[in-house]
Amino acid sequence: QVQLVESGGGLVQAGGSLRLSCAASGRTFRTNAMGWFRQAPGKEREVVAAISGSGGTTYYVESIKGRFTISRDNAKNTVYLQMNSLKVEDTAVYYCAARSNEYATLNSHAYAYWGQGTQVTVSS
C-alpha cells in the first residue's frame, strides 16, 4: 500500500510558475513509477507526465512539453512537477499516482495508488 500526499498548488498568474510535490509512504518508493494527472472542471482526468522508478525515463503529454518537468528524489520519497509558463487552461486539480512497478507509462489505468489532489488555478 502506498499513500500519496500532494502539495504546492495555489493561485498564480498566467506566465508564472509553481512546483508541485507528492510525498509517498513506504520503503520501496524507487520501485514505483509515478505519474501526474489533472482534472479540470467539467472535463475528464488527463495524464500530464510520468517518470520511472529510477527517474531515468520520463514521458510528457504534448500540451505541456517544454513547460513542465517531472522529477523525483528517491531519498525523500517525493516526486515533483515543475510547472513554468503556466496558462489559464492549466487550471485543474492535479493528482499524483503510483504504479506497482518501476516502469513509467502515460496510461492512467496502470496506476494503482492515487493522492487526494491539489488545486492549481491560473488567472489571466
Image (cartoon, rainbow, N blue to C red):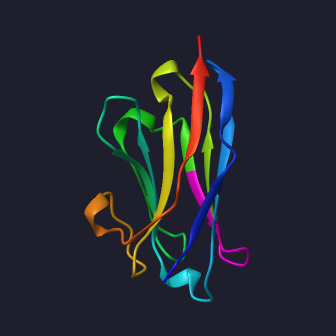
Q: Foreground residue, 96 or 61?
A: 96
Residue 23, percent from left and from top:
65, 66
Q: Read off the magenta span.
A: 70-78
Is residue 57 in the magenta section? no
Q: Which residue is drawn at 65% across and 76% down?
A: 74
Q: Is residue 82 visible?
A: yes
Q: In this view, does 71 lie above or below 111?
A: above
Verify whether residue 73 appears in magenta: yes
- Residue at the image point whose x is 35% and y is 38% from the top: 62
Q: Which sits in the foreground, 13 or 72?
A: 13
Q: Image point 33% across, 44% down: which residue? A: 45
Q: Quadrant of the C terminus?
A: top right
Residue at image position (36%, 43%) is 61
Q: Judge from the rendering whether residue 54 lies leftward or rightward of residue 46; answer left or right.
A: right
- Specify whether 118 is left or right of 105: right
Location of residue 7 in the rendering, given as x and y in whole percent from the top left corner = 67, 51
Question: Residue 116's spot in the image, x, y percent?
Answer: 53, 55
Percent coordinates x, y for residue 105 in the rendering: 33, 64
